[in-house]
Image: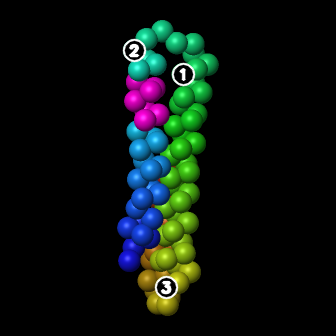
Amino acid sequence: MSHTIRDQKKLKARTNKIQGQVIALKKMLDEPHECAAVLQQIAAIRGAVNGLMREVIKGHLVEHIVHEGDEAKRETDLDVVLKVLDSYIK
């Protein structure tokens, strides 16, 4: 079973939190708010997205790299993770 399916409830809870934060940000932009409050909300969204990314990467590393018996498959999966990290960190 894939780690994203096994951890589906936890990952969906994180995405629901992110969705709620984005909706709150949209509302903040529709009405007058202090810039600091808007920036704080953006930072909270970023933190939540980073947490989601961390959980999915951890699951991927454990399931598809650490526990993978085929070395060629392990190297391929590692390359995938490294490319995703490169694009995420840009």
Q: Earlier in the sequence, mark 2 or mark 3?
A: 2
In the picture, the quarter occupied by the N terminus is bottom left
Vertical placement of residue 85 versus 65, above or below: above
Q: Position of residue 16 (x, y in %)?
A: 41, 44
Between 19 and 72, which is closer to the camera in this rendering? 19
Q: How many marks?
A: 3
Helix, strand, or loop for circle 2? helix
Distance from Cα at disc 1 to Cα at disc 3: 44 Å
Nearer-the-camera pick, 13 or 60: 13
Determine if residue 80 is in view. Answer: no
CB-based contact (under 8 Å), mark 2 and mark 1: no
User: Around disc 1, counting alpha carbons within 10 Å, would you say few (fewer than 14), some (14 to 19), or many (20 or more)?
Assistant: some
Q: Where does the image place residue 50, in percent across and percent down from the top left?
A: 55, 48
Question: Gap between marks 2 and 1, in whole Å?
Answer: 11 Å
| The one of 17 and 41 positioned closer to us in this rendering | 17
* Residue 13 sits above or below residue 33 on the image: below
The secondary structure type at the circle numbered 1 is helix
Which range of residues does the magenta coloring cover? 20-26
Label 2 belongs to which residue?
30
Q: Amino acid at mark 1?
A: Val
Q: Which residue is mark 3?
A: 68
- Magenta stretch encompasses residue 22: yes
Residue 65 is a magenta residue: no
Crowding around mark 3 (Cα neighbors within 10 Å: few <14, some 14 to 19, many 20+) is some
- Magenta: main secondary structure equals helix
Q: Is residue 57 visible?
A: yes
